[in-house]
Amino acid sequence: MIYQHAVKWLKTQQKKASGEGYRFSWFDWCCLWYPPGWLVLFNRHWQHYHADPDGWNWVEYGLFLVPGGFYLALLNRWLRLGCRSPRQEVDEYNPEYQKAFREEILAPIVQYYFQAELQQINNLPPQSPVIVVMNHAGMCFPWDFITLGYLLSKVRDWEVQPLASETLFQHPWVSWWLPPKWSEVLGAVRAKRGDFEKAIASLTPEANAQGKTLLYAPEGVRGPLKGWSQRYQLQKFDVSFMQMSDRYHIPILPVVCIGSESLHPWTINLKKLQRLFKLPFLPISPLMMVLLIFPSMGVWAMRTRLHYFIQPVQKVNSVQGRTATYKQVQQLREKLQIQIIALLNQDLSHAEAQRRRE
């Protein structure tokens, strides 16, 4: 149970804290094991470190936890703010807050809920920067990315900045769900060509980028969009990460994630509704009824084991022309697809062998 493991984690954290940092109350414990409460934890942690007069209050947090209460909380907050949206003032990446959020909120979720593990750690380079590329899926809050960032930070003490869909920055729904500029402060980089290149340029030796790295999904939103019927089938890769790697001489670290497809299983994407609401994807599944009753569960995901298999570092061969670059990208995609199939077959073989022993 996440609660039993988290109690041990809390005792360790309290010994380290010495009265500093964010410390769990009984209410936080309720939110940790109760899925609609994860959004409460995110916001309460933010409010501990940042002045946020426009944020959610205690009455509204309580409403999050009852069926349909989120809508009342949203109405109450909107009226309380004078019928306007929350102000968004803080917007700079803060590595100290990223570290606090990682150790105080993500740790119990990643370790005991997703039971996340890094495999083949010997392939991790001793130093950064690198561009970490990974298959992306789940059609939900990007827990596969967030979890990998946490694990890399824990193992190598890297500052990991993920490239994220613009929806996480500016969509009206997100501006009400999460604290103002939450994604930016935690280090997310907008998935736009200019912002991507600026982030890559900041990793060069001239920028004194030791200890920093960028996390990138070459499938983009095509990964989550494919839905449950095409799980673990890699979609078309963008070529931009390969071009940037060549231009700025930053090696690529491929990672294969197994388990991410089960973060929101049995999903299909309704494209017309997705476009209507201007979302990167709109997942429809048996779980959607629960999400309509508890909208705060939008940052939650199904419990699944997230296993990450680190592949050998790949240095890009300098090439001329988009066609040659595309060929290299396609070769990497095929290599990762073969690895995914091999790992899935290996899991099936282990499961079959276990059934026979039983």
Image: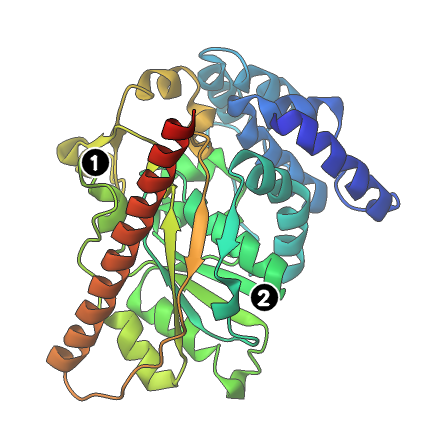
The quarter holding residue 279 reads top left
- Amino acid type of disc 2? Trp
Which numbered mark, 1 or 2, is in the foreground of this view?
2
Residue 242 position (above or below residue 40) = below
Who's the residue at 68% across and 50% down the image? Answer: 100
Q: Nearer the viewer, residue 88 or 207?
A: 207
* Image location of residue 176, percent across then percent down: 46, 34
Q: Which mark is residue 158?
A: 2
- Lower position in the chain sequence, tag 1 or tag 2: 2
| Residue 178: image location, x then y, percent | 50, 38
Which type of secondary structure does the marked residue at label 1 adopt? Answer: helix
Dot 2 crowding, Cα within 10 Å, few <14, some 14–19, many 20+: many
Residue 54 in sight in this render: no
Decide which of 101, 173 is in the foreground and name it: 101
Residue 68 visible in the picture: yes
Q: Quadrant of the C terminus?
A: top left
Marking on residue 51? none
Question: What residue sits 27% from the left and 55% below the top?
Answer: 220
Using the numbered discs, state the Cα–Cα distance from disc 1 to disc 2 in whole angstroms.
35 Å
Q: Is residue 176 above or below residue 119?
A: above
| Residue most extreme to the right | 18
Type of the residue with mark 1? Gln
Toward the front, the furthest residue is 357
Measuring 24% from the left and 65% from the top, which residue is drawn there? 335
Q: Residue at x 62, y 57 (%)?
A: 154
In-image side of 274 versus 23 (left or right): left
Whether label 1 touches label 2, CB < 8 Å: no
Q: On the rendered image, what quadrant is the N terminus found in?
A: top right
Kindly identify which residue carries mark 1.
Answer: 274
Quick check: 250 left or right of 29? left
Image quadrant where residue 107 sits? top right
